[in-house]
Image: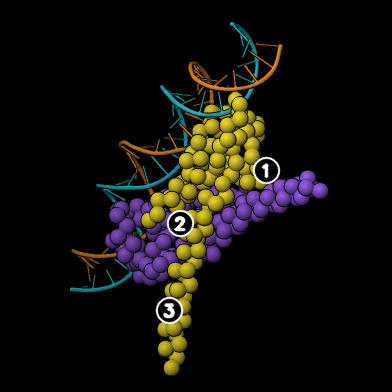
Chain colours: A purple, B yellow, C cyan, D orange
Amino acid sequence: MSDTQDVLFRTLADPTRRALFERLCREGEKTVGALTARAGVSQPVVSKHLGILKQAGLVRDRHEGRQTHYSAQLGALAPLVDWTSEMADFWQNRFDQLEDLLKRMDQ
Amino acid sequence: MSDTQDVLFRTLADPTRRALFERLCREGEKTVGALTARAGVSQPVVSKHLGILKQAGLVRDRHEGRQTHYSAQLGALAPLVDWTSEMADFWQNRFDQLEDLLKRMDQ
DNA sequence: TCAACCCATAGCCAACGGGGTATGGATTGT
DNA sequence: ACAATCCATACCCCGTTGGCTATGGGTTGA
């Protein structure tokens, strides 16, 4: 129901965006030009994707003269981790219930 | 680069599909009819989404007479967890490198 | 056997989204 | 001052996709 998760999943669903985010995680802060050089798409497209990543809270930008430096904001992944944990918990609880049922049936 | 992650992200990016998967995690095995009743979309749409979830390995189907029971396959989320861990590791390594640099500069 | 039911597939349409080029604002260097 | 550079925005195009209805195959019950 939380809208944050929706934004995260939608944002990371695109391969180009995920690749940009991965590079920022691996290699740290990068300028738009440096990212464009190996992105396989045009500079405006890179800028647009970075804008979407920024809006999702996954990256941060820092202006320095005429270039913009982007860096990953790892904390933004927390809702995603929470979601997977939640799903695992539901699963576990249902498993426990089944186990209880089997125990009661065993008696 | 792994294609599995791409499939997972794309599959879970849709709110309707994610809601179906969540219900299966929370409430366990359900028939298509039961899922359709509260999905807010038509039965064919539910079937299509379940097909996509199945293709992604996120659900399993079991035929019983004229109805089909679907259940969540939690293990399929593993690549997603791996990906987030990997991103966190990259982040941590870079942080360690920075720390080392600062230590050397301190001497 | 025939009607009713459950589900999947097919076909269609509208909306979204990711790609491109063109352009302009801002900054740097000459 | 002027040219070049870096980035963001605007605009358009087209493929993808998520929704619908219609339909058919398979199963159950009368």
Query: Which of the 4 image quarters holds residue C17?
Result: top left
Closer to the chain start, of discs 1 and 3, is 1
Q: Chain of mark 1?
A: B
Q: Amino acid at mark 3?
A: Gln
Q: Which residue is mark 2?
A: A53
Is B41 above or below relative to B56?
A: above
Give left or right: position of D30 versus A60. Answer: right
Q: What is the number of the mark on residue B27?
A: 1
Task: Compare residues B26 and A17 and report the one nearer the observer.
Answer: B26
Q: Residue B21's x, y, as percent?
A: 58, 43
Label 3: element kind: helix
Q: CA distance from mark 1 to mark 3?
A: 46 Å
Give left or right: position of C2 versus C16. Answer: right
Q: Chain of mark 2?
A: A
Residue at 60% x, 25% y is: B66
Evaluate if marks 3 and 2 touch, with contact meaning CB atoms under 8 Å apart. no
Q: CA distance from mark 1 to mark 2?
A: 33 Å
Query: Which of the 4 image quarters holds residue B47?
Result: top right
Q: Chain of mark 3?
A: B
Q: Residue A13's x, y, as percent?
A: 45, 49
Question: Would you say residue B41 is visible in this rendering?
Answer: no
Label 2: element kind: helix
Label 1: element kind: helix
Asked if badge 1 and badge 3 are on a common chain, one would say yes
Which residue is most to the bottom?
A: B107
Q: Which residue is mark 3?
A: B97
